[in-house]
Image: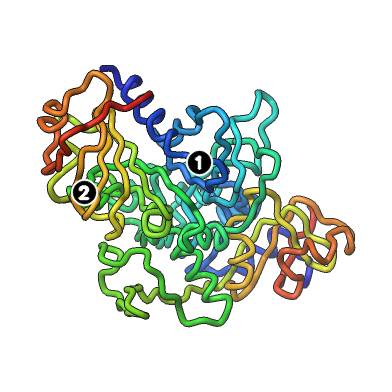
Amino acid sequence: MTAMDAQTIIAKRIAQELRTGMLVNLGIGIPTLVANHLPPGVNVYFQSENGLIGTGPVPEPGMAQARLTDAGGKAVSALPGACTFDSAMSFGLIRGGHVAMTVLGGLQVDQQGLLANWMIPGKMVPGMGGAMDLVTGAKRVVVAMQHSAKGKSKVVQRCNLPLTSVRPVDLVVTELAVIAFPGGRATLMETAPGVSVQQVIEATEAELVVPSSVPSMQL
Amino acid sequence: MQTISLAKAVELIPDGASLMLGGFMGVGTPELVVDELVRQRKRDLTVIANDTAFPGVGIGKLVDARLVKKAIVSHIGTNPETQRQMIAGELQVDLVPQGTLIERIRAGGFGLGGILTPTGVGTVVAEGKRTIEVEGKAFLLEIALKADFALVQAFLADTTGNLAYALTARNFNPVIAMAGGTVIVEAEHIVPTGVIAPDHVMTPATLVDYLIANA
């Protein structure tokens, strides 16, 4: 499976979680791709935490506005009905539970659903940006990540990287599986097309609860 | 509010000053003020801002010129030079969750001692801080932040000093305008008083100490 295929599976599956009217915050990387796979008829508001609700696609060539950017500093457009605000308001929306769903990348998720996604001590210290607030405050937290990195499972028994929050995430979607955490235990909800339950278990360090019937993702 | 030249405004800032700067990845950063800080070689600065942007952009220019002693920011991932100086021990970086950073600044400007936030509870961010339980829920006590100067970028300033911001260039700007001891404003457009309707003023003129005059 190529990396691009994996990203598309993840983004398409997560896009199915979106419902009309939701305020949604997408992180950078795979989460950004979710916007490209909105199911027909579903209209959501995307928030950019630098101060925008109603983030639209990358502008046509020559139509970029230097003061209209996403949280990565890249030019975006604003959809009809968009609004802008300062950073205190933006994080009030996030921490205050007004964001229905956030989709973030992950370095590790453990079997209780705890996420580590902001630093690798001694190697990568980019800063947490808005990730800690998003995981703490969004109503629903979805992690978009590849199942493994360098042959090692990213769904682990216990995170050894610094945690982003002590609030567990709600859903993890990888190119192999959908995992949720009912009762605080990692539970295999779906497998990717052509992937067996056994393959997921073998690729996963965490102890997975496997229900008697595990459906395949409908992509 | 007084009008002032760019050079004179930056002459007000001593070496070692603490500065709050608007901007998110360089968008909404007072770029002329930054260039003048570099030209006048203001050193040992403490910078409080969302991020250090990119090398050669916004606050990144202060880092490139090695004028920053300490940065209190939420993110340095887009600036490898900040990371290099941090790892080399030349630049102290305090990483603060973005929502906590802006609320600490807001608290500073709004006369509060600090804020209670659930963000960071139980993580490395909580180390050395008080965790306070309120109605059964844990919060971190995060103390207020102020600075000697707030360096604000506005889209419009009227000749009274009222400010309005544009699109995502607003970000930290109206909040730091409350928390800086001296507030210096660089505006893209200086317009006659009245052009910004009262309901559309985002920062009242009484907060502005200096408005940089057109060159």
Q: Relative to residue B44, is residue B191 drawn left or right?
A: right
Residue A19 - label:
1
Labels 2 & 1 near each other (Cβ < 8 A): no
Q: Relative to residue A3, is residue A204 drawn left or right?
A: left
Instruction: Please state the horizontal and vertical placement of residue A23, each as a whole percent of the image.
Output: 53, 48
Instruction: Please state the horizontal and vertical placement of residue A148, each as a whole percent of the image.
Output: 20, 32
Q: Which of B182 and B156 is in front in this view?
A: B156
For the residues carrying marks 2 and 1, which lies nearer the camera in this image?
1
- Closer to the chain start, of discs 2 and 1, is 1
Asked whether residue A55 appears in the rendered view, the answer is yes
Secondary structure under the numbered disc 1 in the rendered image: loop
Residue B211 - label:
none
Quarter of the figure with residue A208: top left
Task: Say which quadrant the N terminus of chain B sits in.
Answer: bottom right
Tell how many labels.
Answer: 2
| Residue picked out by circle 2 | A122
Instruction: Please state the horizontal and vertical placement of residue B19, each as a whole percent of the image.
Output: 53, 65
Q: What's the residue type where badge 2 is placed?
A: Gly
Secondary structure under the numbered disc 2 in the rendered image: loop
Quarter of the figure with residue B133: bottom left
Q: What's the residue type where badge 1 is placed?
A: Arg
Q: Which residue lies furthest to the front in this view?
A: A212
- Which residue is depicted at the point 59% across and 72% down? B180
Q: Which chain carries label 2?
A: A
A28 in relation to B126, above or below: above
Instruction: Please state the horizontal and vertical placement of residue B160, each as a whole percent of the image.
Output: 83, 68
